[in-house]
Image (cartoon, rainbow, N blue to C red):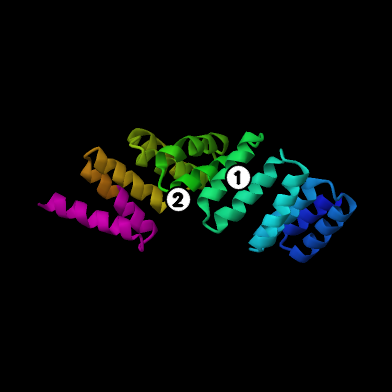
Amino acid sequence: MDKLKQGIEQMQNHNYEEAAKLFTEAIDENPKEPVGYINFGNLLTHMNDHVRAERFFHRAIELDEKAATAYYGLGNVYYEQEKYTKAQEQFILAVQNGLDEADVHFMLGMTYVHQEYPKLALPYLLRAAELAPEDVDVQFQYGLCAAQNGQIDEAEKVMNGVLQLEKEHSDAYYNLGVVALHKEDAHLALEHFTRALEINSEHMLAAHAKAQVEQALNE
């Protein structure tokens, strides 16, 4: 097994020092190969060493300006520092250079969500949802974004899908309650808010919504 593969295995097992040693050796042996720098950049991102991670990704891009995963890695560095506009630019470059995986579309969508541009987020979260039908977080964020864009039926369908993947998803129940209110079905909304609170008694939004619906039904 080559050093990069060994390094990735060590990183996945949280043996970061051993991973760093293997990536360093791989870079020393092939200093013109961008993959070593990308892997080291990913490792440094895991370790929250954003300054050095950025440097390694830039070096990879210098060696190969079409290295899509280097742009993706750089996007993650900026995203973790809440520099969403800079992250967005890098994720777009990753996509333009051929990266078509759920993660990059999801992260790109989330940069727009954080900047409160749900319309711009929607196509990327939809693409992520298509590519990762079993990923609860991806599906949930897409459903949430669909609701924010007024696509109530789509949001309802997606939130029900989330519950197929994870039965005890309190936020999915809460959002189904909101959908039910949009459809003027207060009794169904109450059921969903109650279920959200059964799963998570600390769910403040569900508690507030449930109290309001109960008050309205009692009047």
* Residue 158, picture quadrant: top left
The mark lying in front, picked from 2 and 1, is 1
Quadrant of residue 156 within the rendered picture: top left
Residue 50, disc? none
Q: Is residue 55 above or below residue 127?
A: below
Separation (CA) of disc 2 from disc 1: 16 Å
Disc 2 residue type? His
Horizontal relation, residue 214 to residue 132: left or right:
left
What residue is shown at x 26% (from left), y 54% (from top)?
Answer: 209
Q: Is residue 88 left or right of residue 116?
A: right
Magenta residues (range) = 192-219
Q: Which mark is residue 114?
A: 2
Q: Name the magenta segment's main secondary structure.
A: helix
Q: Which residue is mark 1?
A: 90
Tell me residue 99's x, y (percent): 65, 37
* Residue at 50% over, 42% down: 109
Between 101 and 51, the residue placed more toward the observer is 51
Residue 12: tell me if it is visible: no
Residue type, mark 1 in image: Gln
For mark 2, give the secondary structure: helix
